């Protein structure tokens, strides 16, 4: 069975600090996909990144970066020089290739608060 | 290109009434997914549909819940005889094909159901 664990329920930082959100996953499939979504206070879900299990290259997009390590089944997300607008709940999610319709299994989310 | 449209955004129902939640997928998307987010929790998969077919309903409660995605018109999530425990945010997502290597699911803004 697939499972996603986000051990950090809440994180609070001061603006301009770097912050890393942890994500650990479990799957028996060899082909799977990992995602991060952002849910701001307005409630919608914003797609941030997709990564497949065969691509372990880290990715950087502006202030965001992702570290995918299959050896530890982790897909961590780092925000550099955090800003108040980064305050949101962040969800890590997993989809197995053989799962019908590729439904997503979400972690419980990490509430990030960036204080001015 | 409009995103995934859900309506209503907020819905209040008394215990025992019926709730109907609508989801219009993005243009060209034939795959629809419904997720439920209980307060302070992550999103949980409910059902996956393609046009006129339920592909995977393994996350749907066995009673009172049903979903459809007709040939014409939006997908409907129907909850009969609502109870307080049904109060949650219900998210719809759509994709043009199987989520995975080349595509992700795009989420609507959600319908927040409150049962009083």
Image (cartoon, coloured by chain):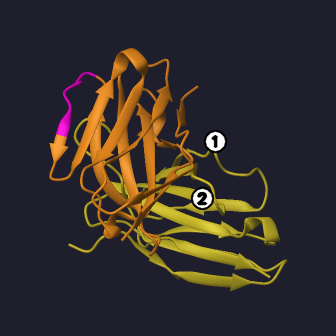
Q: Main secondary structure of the magenta part?
A: loop
For disc 2, the chain is B
Reply yes or no: does residue A44 show up in magenta: no
Q: Nearer the viewer, residue B23 or B85?
A: B85
User: Along the horizontal axis of the image, is B109 left or right of A3?
Assistant: left
Q: Quadrant of the N terminus of chain A?
A: top right
What is the number of the mark on residue B58? 1
Magenta-highlighted residues: A54-59
What is the number of the mark on residue B10? none
Chain in orange in the render: A
Measuring from the top left, give residue A26's x and y in whole percent: 51, 25
Label 2 in the same subunit as label 1: yes
Q: Residue at x 44, y 19 (%)?
A: A29
Query: In the displayed structure, would residue B98 be above or below residue A30?
Result: below
Which corner quadrant of the image does residue B99 belong to?
top left
Q: Nearer the viewer, residue B78 or B107?
A: B107
Q: Nearer the viewer, residue A53 or B63?
A: A53
Chain in yellow in the render: B
Q: Earlier in the sequence, mark 2 or mark 1?
A: 2
Measuring from the top left, give residue B40's x and y in whole percent: 64, 60
Which corner quadrant of the image does residue B15 belong to?
bottom right
Q: Residue at x 30, y 49 (%)?
A: A18
Which corner quadrant of the image does residue A51 belong to?
top left
Distance, label 2 to label 1, CA atoms, is: 13 Å
For label 1, the SS is loop
| Residue placed under numbered mark 2 in the picture | B36
């Amino acid at each position: 069975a697939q499972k996603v664990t986000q051990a950090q329920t809440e994180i609070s930082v001061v603006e301009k600090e770097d912050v890393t959100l942890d994500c650990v996953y479990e799957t028996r499939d060899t082909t799977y996909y990992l995602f991060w979504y952002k849910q701001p206070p307005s409630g919608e879900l914003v797609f941030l990144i997709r990564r497949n299990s065969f691509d372990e290259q880290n990715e950087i997009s502006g202030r965001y970066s992702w570290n995918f390590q299959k050896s530890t089944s982790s897909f961590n997300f780092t925000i550099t020089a955090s800003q108040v607008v980064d305050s949101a709940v962040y969800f890590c999610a997993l989809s197995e290739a053989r799962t019908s319709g590729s439904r997503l299994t979400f972690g419980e989310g990490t509430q990030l608060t960036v204080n001015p | 290109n409009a995103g995934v449209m859900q309506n209503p955004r907020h819905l209040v129902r008394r215990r025992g009434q019926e709730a109907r939640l609508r989801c219009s997928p993005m243009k060209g998307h034939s795959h629809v997914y419904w997720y439920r987010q209980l307060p302070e929790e992550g999103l949980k998969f409910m059902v996956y549909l393609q046009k006129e077919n339920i592909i995977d309903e393994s996350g749907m409660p066995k009673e009172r819940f049903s979903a459809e995605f007709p040939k014409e018109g939006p997908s409907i999530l129907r909850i009969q005889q609502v109870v307080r425990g049904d109060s949650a945010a219900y998210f719809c997502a759509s994709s043009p094909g199987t989520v995975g290597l080349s595509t992700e699911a795009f989420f609507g803004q959600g319908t927040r159901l409150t049962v009083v």
